[in-house]
Amino acid sequence: MTDNIKISTALKKLGNLWVLSFIFLTTPVLGQPVVSEGFIHLTDHDFNTHEVIPLSGDWGFFWNALLDPEDIAPLENPVFRDFASTWDLDDELSTEGAATYTLTIVLPHSHPPLALDIPDFYSSYRLFINGEEISSNGNPSLDESEYSAYWLPQVKSLVNHDTDTLSLVLHVANFGYSNGGAYLPLGIGKAEQLYRSRTIEYGYSLVLMGALLMAGLFFFGLYFFGRNDQAILYFALFCIVYSYRIVGYSPYPLHYLLPDLPWLLTTKLEYLTLYFAGFFFGTYTLKLYPNETSVLLMNILRGISLLFAAIALILPPSVFSYLVNPYIFIVTGYMVYAFWVYTKAAINKNVGARFAVASTGVVFLVFLNIILVYFGLIQEYLLLSFLGYLFFFGLQSLVLSYRFADSLKTAKEQAEESSQAKSQFLSTMSHEIRTPLNAVIGLSGLLSESELNEKQKEFSQTIKTSGETLLSILNNILDYSKIESEKIELEHKEFDLKKLIQNVIEVNSPSFNDKDIKLSYELGNDVPLQLVGDSTRLQQILLNLVSNAVKFTEKGSVLIKVSSLSKKSNPKLLKFEVSDTGIGIPDDKVNRLFESFSQVDASTTRKYGGTGLGLAISKRLVELMGGTIEVSSKEKEGSTFSFTIQLFEITIKEPPKDTKESDTETQSEGATFEKLSVLVAEDNMINQKVAIRILEQLDIVPDIANNGEEAAEMVSKNKYDLVFMDMEMPVMDGLDATREIRKQKDTLPFNPKIIAMTANALPGYREKCLEAGMDDFITKPVSTDSIRSILATWF
Ligand code: ADP
């Protein structure tokens, strides 16, 4: 196409800038042949070098007549009229009516295959060449009764008209639109070139339409499934509405694809989408940068847009189409305003505002390009307006993506903060509850073992059990919150699997002593005993499963079975099974067991206690250790909980010490620790008493230090096997006392094991204790079981 046709088409694409396009159309390109008095001589024109010649200039013109091509020749003195000028611009004509245009083209003797580029006219036409109809839009007629309109630019091949002279007769009629006649000239050029241009143009339009529609749907989804950000919603609507305009506006690929769409419908949609696009873009800008945008100015734009849309909806095209030019000027003004808003937003460091500025910048660049092309300074490419659109929408999308990502980041930070506050709160709360609970459990335990009558014994036992339940709930909740906030880090230390299992059995011994249950374990021959992994967590899982098994079994047996699933590889995948002959679990409840706070039925808590967290915690721990957990159960027959975890085998095995025993054992007797000399460093009188009484139960008579300094001094003078070290003490706290003791390790009579005894269960606290030189960690409230278990671990 020649430059001036391209400019006017490009301008139309930028937003119906029809007024400007008229100016361009009437400007002939220097040196090009023009139509004069109904003739154009192209005999000297080389169609191989010049692509397209616009057939602009003065055509023969017959107003209010649709003449048969055969009747035209005898007519004399036709009127000549500038072809590409609409009827309403001429006082002697009216917008509505019909006319015949005539043109004779004289072609060179030899030329490549040619074609005509026929634009859409206002608002119907029929074109004859050498008496033969080659193209039409709608049905042009002399009055409204048979008239119908259609807009679709077309390229028509001239290969069937292989003569030197082409006689063009064009009927144009308009009844029902605010313009009549032609606004663009026809073009003649190499068929191959014209078809190619049109295909590319349609290709760009369809690609753009698809991209915009997808972007719109994507942002729509983001709005509904995201944080309901209204800026995103309005941008989504803007994209979707505009995607219609890309195909439902010149060169109208939609009309090409769906030729049966009624003109009235497509015209209304063309205008409605323009006004709605303005409305949505204005609202989007307002929602995006409310502090930088004037609500009044945006409301004016939105009001005008809605008003014009209402007019387009209700009134006929002959009326509503008058409003388009003023609207385009308003929108151009608002584009400049949007640029200013985005610039302010960028200065105020609003999220993504730089992209918004860039996007309006792109629109201005496209405008600039059109102007430069007009002055002949650079060439115009179809690709440019395509890229312009793409960048504009792409950059606006980036604004929103940026904004969305930013809101997610903020939400994440807030969630992290509140989760930190939550775990801080939980730790503090558990610390505060643990201290008095220590006294409740310890003293009620001791009380129930003193000389009491039956009633008193029962009461003190109930206090002890309730205290223990409260403690286990506290521990579970704390554990669960640690797992939820991913605060749990696995340890990798050496341990003896057999000892660990024996310990689990030992700890459970008091619970089943009064039941008729045989608690035993089986270790497969290929199960390595010296392993590396998080023994504390493994023990926690086993303790939970075994204590559940004991809890829900009245009679029969509980068996812990360990087998190896991998023969050679390291880490080893070990399978642990805990089976019981207890009450079992109904089929319909099995699936929900591993969810938090899930118990088989409401009576479970009343009857057996518990929080319904143990299995949820076990499941998460098992998964952390690279395994899975499952259950199979039959009501009234029993359950088997099995899980797998990955553990590293220590390949250089130490010779077995006891040839931390047979492989199949039943419950071992509780060990005694009477030979141990123990120091308890504890400032609180009640807790001192609790510790003394508990240790006495295990045949240990401890010494007492009232603070850390005293403890360090006593250790330097006496031989202690073990020090239970409280953390918060006056004069010198537990950590400093430990450091002091470890500092003097070469001069001490004996280097004792030091075990922290604290009400602080904060994550990372254990590590602090180990760093200071302690050997292990036990949380308050302590009980005979927990002390026995830790002693069994170390002695
Ligand atoms: P808790 O035992 O504290 O209630 P768990 O998460 O450990 O919480 O167990 C959840 C529920 O699963 C129990 O309340 C019980 O209903 C059921 N359950 C667990 N283990 C067994 C078992 N060995 N036999 C029967 N029911 C069990």
Image: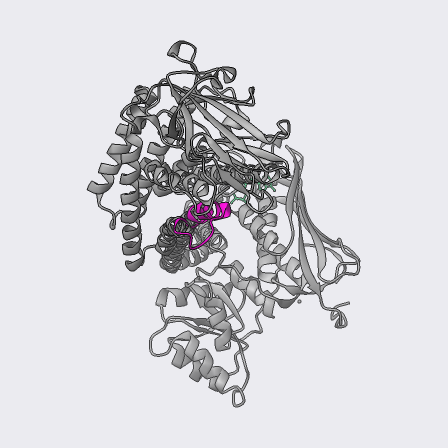
As drawn, the residue found furthest toward the left would be: 296
The answer to whether 55 appears left or right of 197 in the picture is left
- Please say whether residue 751 is one of the residues in the magenta stretch: no
Numbered circles on residues, count: 0
Which region shows up in magenta?
374-395
The answer to whether 98 appears left or right of 562 in the picture is left
Residue 779 position within the rendered picture, expressed as x and y whole percent measured from the top left: 46, 62
Residue occupying the point 58% across, 65% down: 491
Instruction: Point out the quarter of the image occupied by ligand 1.
Output: top right
The answer to whether 792 appears left or right of 690 in the picture is right
- Please say whether residue 386 is one of the residues in the magenta stretch: yes
In front of the other: 682 or 141: 141
Q: Quadrant of residue 419?
A: bottom left
In front of the other: 464 or 173: 173
Residue 68 position within the rendered picture, expressed as x and y whole percent measured from the top left: 49, 15
Split into 4 quadrants, where in the image is the C terminus? bottom right
Q: What secondary structure is the magenta-colored segment mainly? A: helix
Q: Is residue 781 above or below residue 156?
A: below
Residue 446 position within the rendered picture, expressed as x and y whole percent measured from the top left: 45, 58
Q: Is residue 98 visible?
A: yes
Q: Is residue 472 visible?
A: no
In front of the other: 790 or 647: 647
Q: Is residue 777 above or below residue 523?
A: below
Residue occupying the point 52% across, 86% down: 745
As drawn, the residue found furthest toward the bottom would be: 747
Residue 213 position within the rendered picture, expressed as x and y whole percent measured from the top left: 48, 36
Residue occupying the point 41% across, 54% down: 409
The colour mode here is one colour
